[in-house]
Structures are given as structure tokens and as C-alpha cells.
């Protein structure tokens, strides 16, 4: 991808300014054009993979998600091409919007794009195309969504249809119904679960906050904007800490192939004035993420976004991931709605939280502990509360970071009797420098886990109960790439291979861990001294002399 020369004056960290974002958007739009059908209603991107929704739906996805990019770019020539495709699509090419079908998702992108570019696209269509488009979109008002972020797609479609006066009562009912359903998943402090359970990930930013806040902003509804905007601002205080010093987002959760869609809530806060971040910090974080992916092969030699993380990578895909799925990354270009003179574009870049100081930050609703180090820019997420309904390596491991990916060898796990399962995660709290949880492990054993962190060092403790005496327990740590050091040392009831056996009703296993990019760190055994008393109380003395005591038992984790 050809971008302008780096701007090191206004953007000393990334070299990226508005011109780089515009050039990236233009290049992505140009690259997909050869894959449009003759009528421009479908974009069939190359590749052997088809999502579980089928090729026709995948083609609609290609249209809708790249239209959204053209809308944020406000590119009149591109929008003319999409107007041609819209006319064909609603004349019988596109599949109907039905219960829990993928077209419901894509209808939201189309409706949002039409609403944002009403003067450039919608108002220039002939009346027949407008009527057919409204009728097609109206299917979203009554289609039943999956009980998760999908509830917000009828809200987004309803907002546009109400705006143009189409079925206003049904549109308003869909908006109210969706917002009411999503409300039950608000967990406080700026965090939502993505449906029932404890599914915390980037869907908070690129869906659960994005659609309600944009809806309130476009409606000019100050009451709604106060509610959803204040939640967004609180979320961004935590969210800004999820980006590494190299720009990388944390590799945790699903749909990671959306890549720099992670920047959408950063721009959204600036767009609506609901952000705790300084303008230069917002741009530094967002541009850092875009640069991170563009520098690492996210775009192939045809200029297309690949299905993966850096380059192609099937391990981050889901059944719904079709060839055009990565183009939800278009949400990352939301910042182009801000005028060129906006301070987010003109202010000098400022360092993000990870670059300012070492930090260990508790995040209450998901029961996470975020651990970041300034020297190497690594962010680590200790997960003591987020899980999917099934075992998923991107939800279920004890820890994730900005420089590692979940390994097939079950990194960051407690393996009981050969089984790495971690289900039924029960959060036990998080606070200054610690987090704890309980889960069901192999053979039905219960494991109470705690992590204490300072700098790059971690103390991990696991109390295993309900396993037969002599059951093997193995504790695993980080799986690090080249240039990154991963360490795990036994402290209690573990041998040099980090394996031990249970004895009696409950056995405590303790290890020291570290993930660091420092070339010559202090030996791990000198970074923290760990002792265990006869009653199971663990004492940790950090290298600066600070001392912490804690104990695990059947009722939870107790810090002194």
C-alpha cells in the first residue's frame, strides 16, 4: 500500500496523519473494485473460503462493508458506484433480511452509510430506488436478531428509516426494543457483555458502544447521548490501555480479523466529545493500530485485507468469517468524519498509557487485570472473568498479551489430569495489583486461581480441589515469539517441568512468571521472593521491598 511520506513533526510516534488515513481508505476501496459484479451489487473477493451463510450473503457483505468505508471517506465517485450497486441489489439481487440471517448485519452497515451520506447518495437516487431500498431495509425492523450485539442492527436500520419517514412507528419500535434488550447486558463502568454470560472483548467498542452512541449523535438526542456517551467515556479510560507501545491491540476475543476496527471507539469519543483522552493521544493510539497492521502484512499484494491477524491466519476465524469479513475494519476509518481542522488531526501525537509508565490496572466488570510495562510496550491481560459458552482459546486462557497469540499447546492454563479445560469461570474480584477467579477444570476439579503483578513480574497461584490424590497438575505460562522472553519458575508443589500432583483434599501450586521484551532483565528469582506458610498464606516481596500477603481457600482469595 502506497502511503504519503511520514510526518514526524505532528506525528512523532507513528508518522501518520489524516493524509495517511485517506490514502489507506482510497487504496482499500480501489483494490476491491475488480471483484464487484457487473451490476456492482455484490463484491466476491477471492479465496477458497465461504462463510456458513453462503456465497450470495458473502457478496452482500463485501458490498456493505466497503460501502461503509466509502461513507466515512465521503468519496463521491466511489459512492456513485455504490449507488449503482444499491439499485441492483434491492431489485432482487440481495437476499431478504430474515430472522438471525447475515443480511441483517449488513443492512446495518448499509443503513448507517446511507444516513451518513444522505446528501451525497440517498438524496440523488430516483424515487423508485429509494422506495425499494426502504422496503428491503424494513425487513430488519421485524427480523429476530441473535441475542447479542445483533440487537443493535435493527436499531441502526430503524434510525435511518425513521429519518426518511419510512414506517416511523415500526422504526421507532425497533429502536426502542433493541436498546431495551441491550440494556440488560450493561455491566457498569463502561462495559457490556456481548449477550448473556461473560463475553467481554472488542465487541464492546466496535458494536456495543458504537451503534448506540452513533444513533444518539445522529438523532441529536441529548438524553440518549448523555447516557451512552458517558458510558463510552468511562470505557475509553480502560480501553486505551489495551494497546501496546507498538500499536498492537490485545489478541483476545473473537472476530480479530476486523483488526483496526479496534480504533472505532477512540474516534467515536472524539467525534461526540465523550472521551477522557487528549486529542493527540487519540490519534496516536488509532494511527498506531493502523500502522501496526499495515506494516505486518494485513494487506496482500493485491491490496486486499486478508482473513487473519497479520497476514492470513485461520486460527482467528469463525464460521461466519467470509472473504469480505475483514472489511468491518472499515469502522476504524470513523475518524474521517472529523474535519481536517479538528484538533484530533492537528494536535501533536502524545504517548498512550502504555508508553507513559508501568501500570497494573484492575478492570472490574470483566474481572481483568491489565499489566503494562513502558520499557518494552507490552500489555498483558490477566483474564479472571471472561469466557465464551464453549472452550475457546481466545476467551478461556488465564492471560493474553499484545505480543503473543494463544498457542495450541495450551499456554497460560492449569492442566488437570491432562485436561486444560477452564469452564464456569467465577470472578472472585480484582484490585490493586491482583485478580482472582474460580473455574471447573479437568475431571470436574475446582481451581481457585490468583495472580499478583508488578512491573513485568507475575506470581500465579492455583488451589486445586476435588481431584483424587495423585492427580497430575501442570501449570503453563506464556508462549513467546522471537525477541520476547517468556519465563515460568516453580515455587510450590511443582517440579522443574512445572508439573506436580495433588495431595489430600486441596493442593496449592505456585509459580513465578514473566513476559518481557527487555534484552537483559533482572533474573526472575531476584525480581520477587515468594514464601508459603503452613496455613497456605503466600507472602510476596517485590524487588522494591513492597510486601503482599494472600491466601486461597474454598471461599475465594483473601489479601492481607
Image: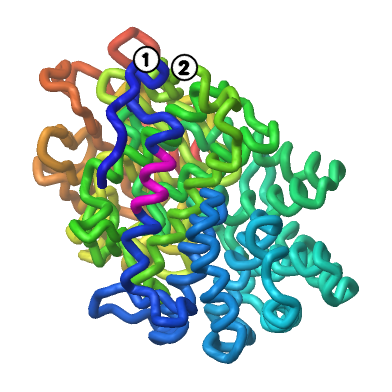
Residue at point 46%, 59% (across, down): 328
The reply to whether callout 1 and callout 2 are in contact (CB within 8 Å) is yes
* In the displayed structure image, the side of residue 307 where residue 36 appears, left or right: right
The quadrant where residue 408 appears:
bottom left
Q: Position of residue 498 (x, y in %)?
A: 16, 45
Badge 1 density bin: few <14, some 14–19, many ≥20, Cα 10 Å: few
- Which residue appears at 46% of the width and 50% of the height? 261
| Residue under pointer 1 | 9
Any mark on residue 288, and which? none
Most frequent secondary structure within the magenta stretch: helix
Examine the rendering and report whether any part of residue 446 can be seen. Answer: no
Secondary-structure class at tag 1:
loop
Q: Is residue 37 visible?
A: yes
In this rendering, would 57 be left or right of 299? right
**Mark 2 neighbour class, 10 Å CA radius: few under 14, some 14 to 19, many 20 or more:** many
Q: Which residues are magenta?
A: 21-27
Q: Disc number at residue 348? A: 2
Amino acid at each position: 500500500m502506497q502511503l504519503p511520506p511520514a510526518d514526524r513533526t505532528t506525528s512523532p510516534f507513528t508518522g501518520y496523519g489524516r493524509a495517511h488515513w485517506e490514502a489507506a481508505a482510497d487504496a482499500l476501496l480501489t483494490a476491491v473494485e475488480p471483484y464487484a459484479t457487473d451490476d456492482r451489487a455484490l463484491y466476491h473477493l477471492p479465496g477458497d473460503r465461504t462463510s456458513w451463510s453462503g456465497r450470495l450473503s458473502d457478496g452482500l457483505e463485501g458490498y456493505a462493508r466497503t460501502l461503509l468505508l466509502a461513507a466515512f471517506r465521503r468519496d463521491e465517485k466511489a459512492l456513485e458506484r455504490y449507488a449503482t450497486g444499491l439499485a441492483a441489489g434491492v431489485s432482487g439481487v440481495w437476499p431478504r433480511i430474515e430472522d438471525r440471517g447475515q443480511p441483517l448485519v449488513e443492512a446495518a452497515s448499509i443503513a448507517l452509510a446511507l444516513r451518513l451520506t444522505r446528501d451525497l447518495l440517498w438524496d440523488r437516487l430516483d424515487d423508485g430506488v429509494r422506495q425499494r431500498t426502504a422496503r428491503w431495509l424494513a425487513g430488519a425492523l421485524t427480523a429476530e436478531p441473535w441475542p447479542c450485539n445483533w440487537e443493535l442492527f435493527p436499531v441502526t436500520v430503524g434510525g435511518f428509516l425513521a429519518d426518511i419517514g419510512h414506517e416511523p412507528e415500526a422504526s421507532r419500535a425497533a429502536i426502542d426494543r433493541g436498546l431495551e434488550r441491550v440494556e440488560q447486558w450493561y455491566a457498569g463502568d463502561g462495559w457490556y457483555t456481548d449477550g448473556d454470560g461473560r463475553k467481554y472483548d472488542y465487541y464492546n467498542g466496535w458494536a456495543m458502544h458504537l451503534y448506540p452512541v452513533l444513533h444518539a449523535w445522529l438523532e441529536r438526542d441529548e438524553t440518549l447521548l448523555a447516557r451512552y456517551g458517558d458510558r463510552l467515556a468511562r470505557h475509553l479510560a480502560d480501553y486505551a490501555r489495551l494497546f501496546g507501545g507498538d500499536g498492537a491491540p490485545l489478541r483476545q476475543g473473537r472476530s480479530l480479523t476486523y483488526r483496526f476496527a479496534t480504533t472505532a471507539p477512540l474516534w467515536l469519543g472524539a467525534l461526540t466529545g465523550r472521551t477522557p483522552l487528549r486529542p493527540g493521544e487519540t490519534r496516536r493510539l488509532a494511527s498506531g493500530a493502523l500502522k501496526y497492521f499495515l506494516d505486518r502484512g494485513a494487506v496482500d499484494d493485491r491490496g486486499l485485507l486478508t482473513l487473519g491477524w497479520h497476514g492470513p491466519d485461520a486460527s482467528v476465524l469463525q464460521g461466519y468469517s467470509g472473504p469480505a469479513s475483514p472489511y468491518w475494519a472499515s469502522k476504524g476509518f470513523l475518524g474521517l468524519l472529523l474535519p481536517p481542522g479538528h484538533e484530533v488531526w492537528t494536535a501533536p501525537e502524545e504517548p498512550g498509557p502504555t508508553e507513559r509508565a508501568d501500570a497494573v490496572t484492575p478492570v472490574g466488570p470483566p474481572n481483568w487485570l491489565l499489566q503494562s510495562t513502558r520499557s518494552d510496550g507490552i500489555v498483558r491481560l490477566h483474564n479472571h472473568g471472561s469466557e465464551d459458552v464453549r472452550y475457546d482459546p481466545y476467551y478461556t486462557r488465564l492471560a493474553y498479551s499484545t505480543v503473543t497469540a494463544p498457542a495450541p499447546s495450551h499456554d497460560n492454563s492449569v492442566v488437570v489430569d491432562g485436561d486444560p479445560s477452564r469452564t464456569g469461570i467465577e470472578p472472585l474480584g480484582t484490585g490493586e495489583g491482583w485478580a482472582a477467579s474460580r473455574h471447573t477444570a479437568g475431571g470436574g476439579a475446582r481451581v481457585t486461581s490468583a495472580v499478583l503483578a508488578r512491573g513485568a513480574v507475575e506470581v500465579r497461584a492455583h488451589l486445586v480441589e476435588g481431584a483424587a490424590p495423585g492427580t497430575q497438575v501442570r501449570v503453563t505460562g506464556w508462549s513467546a515469539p522471537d525477541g520476547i522472553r517468556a519465563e515460568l519458575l516453580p515455587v510450590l508443589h511443582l517440579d522443574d517441568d512445572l508439573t506436580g500432583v495433588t495431595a489430600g483434599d486441596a493442593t496449592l501450586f505456585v509459580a513465578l512468571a514473566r513476559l518481557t521484551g527487555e534484552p537483559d532483565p533482572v533474573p526472575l528469582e531476584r525480581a520477587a521472593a515468594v514464601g508459603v506458610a503452613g496455613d497456605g498464606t503466600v507472602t510476596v516481596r517485590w524487588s522494591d521491598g513492597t510486601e503482599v500477603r494472600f491466601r486461597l481457600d474454598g471461599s475465594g482469595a483473601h489479601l492481607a
